[in-house]
Amino acid sequence: MPSSFEASASDVLDATKVLRNLTTHIDEVVQRYLDGVNQTMTWFGTGDDDFAKKAGPPYKNTVKNVTKGMLAFTEALSALADGTVKNANEYVNQQDDVLSSIKKGNDGRSGPRG
């Protein structure tokens, strides 16, 4: 396990897997929600009566807002995972560059210069 002063790219990448799994799970929840809601989409009636006019639009609006909110949450988590992978890759690339520079500075030798 790395000390508190060093980054572990593998740990960071493992964390992104957790984020990706979470977004997949939320997407599945959204689909189950919509499947359930679709069965109740006409509970208020489909006719031109006063109750259907009064109850239908707010219900449909609530369904739309809940769905939008959950999808926005998965989009945010996905963007976080993408950014985290990018940062981990940049860390690894910079680390490789530094190690390569050190090696060149030591003429390919390891250990103290002298």
Image: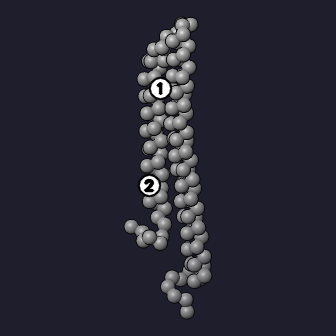
Disc 1: which residue: 34
What residue is shown at x 52% (from left), y 41% (from top)? 73
Q: Amino acid at mark 1?
A: Leu
Disc 2: which residue: 14
Does 11 appear above or below 113?
Answer: above
Question: In the rendered structure, which disc, 1 or 2, sits on the residue that comes first in sequence?
Answer: 2
Around disc 1, counting alpha carbons within 10 Å, would you say few (fewer than 14), some (14 to 19), or many (20 or more)? Answer: some
Q: Amino acid at mark 2?
A: Asp
Secondary structure type for disc 2: helix
Q: Nearer the viewer, residue 30 or 45?
A: 45
Q: Nearer the viewer, residue 6 or 70?
A: 70
| Disc 1 and disc 2 in contact, CB within 8 angstroms | no
What residue is shown at x 60% (from left), y 76% (from top)? 101
What residue is shown at x 44% (from left), y 44% (from top)? 21
Alpha carbon separation for disc pair 1 and 2 = 31 Å
Q: Position of residue 48 (x, y in %)?
A: 56, 7
Quarter of the N terminus within the rendering: bottom left
Query: Which is more foreground, mark 1 or mark 2?
Result: 1
Does 56 appear above or below 92?
Answer: above
Q: Position of residue 58 (x, y in %)?
A: 54, 23
User: In this view, which residue lies farthest toward the bottom?
Assistant: 114
What residue is shown at x 57% (from left), y 56% (from top)? 86
**Could you say which quadrant of the image residue 32 lies in?**
top left
Q: Position of residue 108 (x, y in %)?
A: 56, 80
Quarter of the C terminus within the rendering: bottom right
Secondary structure type for disc 1: helix
User: In this view, which residue lies farthest toward the left?
Assistant: 1
Does 81 appear above or below 92?
Answer: above
Around disc 2, counting alpha carbons within 10 Å, would you say few (fewer than 14), some (14 to 19), or many (20 or more)? Answer: few
**Could you say which quadrant of the image residue 4 lies in?**
bottom left
